[in-house]
Each structure stands twice: as C-alpha cells, then as structure tokens.
Amino acid sequence: MDCDQVMIMGPDNISDNATKDDGSDGGRDDGYLTGQLLIAMPTMGDPRFARTVIYLCAHSADGAMGLVVNKQADEIDFPELLSQLEIETEGVQSPIPVLVGGPVETGRGFVLHSLDYRQDSTLEVSEDVGLTATVDILRSIAEGAGPARSLLTLGYAGWSAGQLDDEIQANGWLNVSADASLLFDGDLSDKWDRAVRKVGIDPSFLSAEAGHA
C-alpha cells in the first residue's frame, strides 16, 4: 500500500462502487445480502481473503461491494492518515481502527459507522449502519463530533454480476446477519471465530474439515 496516496472518496465514487438497489431493504427478502456479514470458509482459494469477515455494503444483480472488517492496516494509523489529509491531529478525541478493506483501490478510504451521524452523501446500508467517505467525517471524528461507533477501511472488495453468488454456491462464504457489537468491535484477533459462532458453528470444526479436504 502506498500511504502517500490515501484519499477519501466523494459521494459520486460511492455510488459508482456500491451497486445497491434503492428498493432493497437490506437484502434479506430479495435474495441479496446487503447489510450482512460474509465469513470466508477455510476452503477459500484466494489467500487475500483467508479468515476474513466482510460487511456487504451492496449486493444486487449488478454485483457486490464489501469491506473487510477484521484486518488491521499495518502501514498507517488514524493520526497519520489525518496528517496526510492535512487535518489537525493535535488533541484527536477518538482515534478509530484503520483496516484493510479489500484489494481494490487500496488508496481509497471508507468509513462504516452508526447512523447517529449522517451527511448528505451517507449511504444508509441498513437501519443502523451507514457508509460515508468524505474528509468531513474524519474531521468530525477527530474533533469528537463523529458517530458513536465507526471504523475506517482502505480499499474494498468487489464482485462482478453473479460472481459472489457463484462463490457462495461453491461454499467459499458463509453469511450471517450483522450486529454492531461484532461489526465495530476493535478486537480483530478473534472476530472471524466469533462470526462463525454467530452462525452456530464451532470454528474448530471448520478447521478440522479443512484439514481433511
């Protein structure tokens, strides 16, 4: 990742990448999974997604877009990012996690957050989670005036039309409803295990199955 090229997306960019159907209610009734968590199975063939948990910001017939929510960005932290964007960093009130959101456009930033904070450009992914990608939300967070819960990802995961559906059919992913306590929890080390348990599966069972595959 080239940390010198980190930038925040404008609302037009979000619309281009998030293919959410405006008529969707979160994907639970129309076969789509917007607002749910994807959990990478041990059989996932792409090492970039090994043991990842992804929050799906959009899923429709046109494709899907999501953000990995359990991989720390080692090259940069929140104060350093603010400094790059020339946002005053002295006295930052609430540093938030900076995560690797996926392999696509890793120099672009996205903030997932609770909906006690909204801008005109905020994409309301579900009833309680929004996606905003402006410098203003970072400034608000730095000043202690941002959302109650949030995380920042650099990059995203994207799928073309039908691609994610095919991967799910091939047992590459599990999906489960998202809850704020799991989504925004800063303890990343066991987030995959906790997501698997939320499905009702013992993570050790999946590891054992992978060992016998």
Image (cartoon, helix red, strand yellow):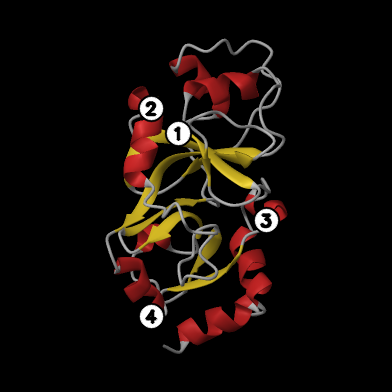
Q: Nearer the viewer, residue 115 or 184?
A: 115
CB of mark 2 within 8 Å of CB of mark 3? no
Label 1 and label 4: CA atoms lie apart by 35 Å
| Mark 1 or mark 2: whose residue is earlier in sequence | 2
Q: Nearer the viewer, mark 1 or mark 3?
A: 3
For label 3, the SS is: helix
Q: 26 or 141: which is nearer to us?
A: 26
Disc 4 crowd rating (10 Å Cα; few below 14, some 14-19, many 20+) is few
Residue 98 visible in this rendered orientation of the protein: no
Which of pointers 4 and 2 indicates the residue nearer the eye? Answer: 4
Q: Position of residue 21 (x, y in %)?
A: 41, 55
Between the residue at mark 1 and the residue at mark 3, the CA separation in whole angstroms equals: 24 Å
- The residue identified by callout 4 is 169
Q: At label 4, which amino acid type do we have? A: Gln
Q: Mark 1 or mark 4: which is in front?
A: 4
Q: Categorize mark 1 by other alpha carbons within 10 Å: few (<14), some (14-19), many (20+).
A: few
User: x, y percentage for residue 66?
Assistant: 44, 53
- Residue 157 versus residue 120 in the image, above or below: below
Q: Residues within 10 Å of mark 2 (few under 14, many from 20)?
A: some
Ranked by sequence position, the earlier of labels 2 and 3 is 2
Residue type beneath disc 3: Leu
Residue 58 visible at all: yes
Disc nearest the viewer among 4 and 3: 4
Estimate the spatial distance between the alpha carbons at disc 4 and disc 3, rounded to whole Å: 25 Å
Which amino acid does the dot numbered 1 rest on?
Glu
Q: Secondary structure at mark 1?
A: loop
Placement of 29 over or under 58, stated as above or below:
below
Image-quadrant location for residue 150: top right
Question: Which residue is disc 3 drawn over?
Answer: 182
Q: Give the residue at mark 2.
A: 6
Residue 148, percent across and down?
72, 35
